[in-house]
Amino acid sequence: MFNRANKQGLRMRPGYSFMLTLDIRQPGSMGDGGFYSDGVVTGMVRVSEHESLPEGTLLSGYLWTSGDVVVGRYTEAQLPDGRTVPVCVVLGRGGYIEKGPDSKPGAADLARSLPAYLVERWP
């Protein structure tokens, strides 16, 4: 993903951020909240300033919601041009997101879209 010599890669740098809708199967608009549980998710890039990871890119990932915080990791990007490339994307600058006040066991209260970051390795 960060190999600038690889023409098939994204040619991006660690730390790059963008706005990600956590799971496109969650109903509502970008500014809405939602409830999430452990499992596979398909995210979508909503706001991006980098042409290699454009808006509309789908990201395959997994959410862990059972702990004190939510950990989200996305490992594959399906670009609008049809290419599929490996990625290392985490939710939140530190690799996690704090749960909202209405969270319950098995249902983490989160905003529907949150900042996501490219990383070289999982935090």
Image (cartoon, rainbow, N blue to C red):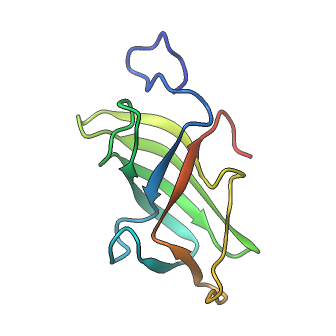
- Out of 61 and 116, give the one closest to the viewer: 116
Q: Give the x, y percent position of residue 17.
A: 54, 43
- Rendering coords of residue 102 (x, y %): 61, 89
**Is 67 displayed left or right of 113 in the figure?**
right
In percent of the image, x 57 and y 27: which residue is there? 13
Most distant residue in the top direction: 5
Residue furthest left as drawn? 81
Q: Nearer the viewer, residue 66 or 28?
A: 28
Give the vertical position of 123 relative to 43 (above or below): above
Residue 20 quadrant: bottom left
Residue at x 48% of width, y 35% of height: 86
Q: Residue at x 31, y 39 (%)?
A: 79
Figure disc tally: 0
Tell me if 77 is positioned left or right of 120 in this view. Answer: left
Where is residue 18 shown, x and y percent of the image?
Answer: 48, 46
Name which quarter of the figure residue 44 lies in: bottom left
Residue 113 x/y as whole percent: 46, 64
Residue drawn at the location 47% of the way across and 79% of the way down: 34
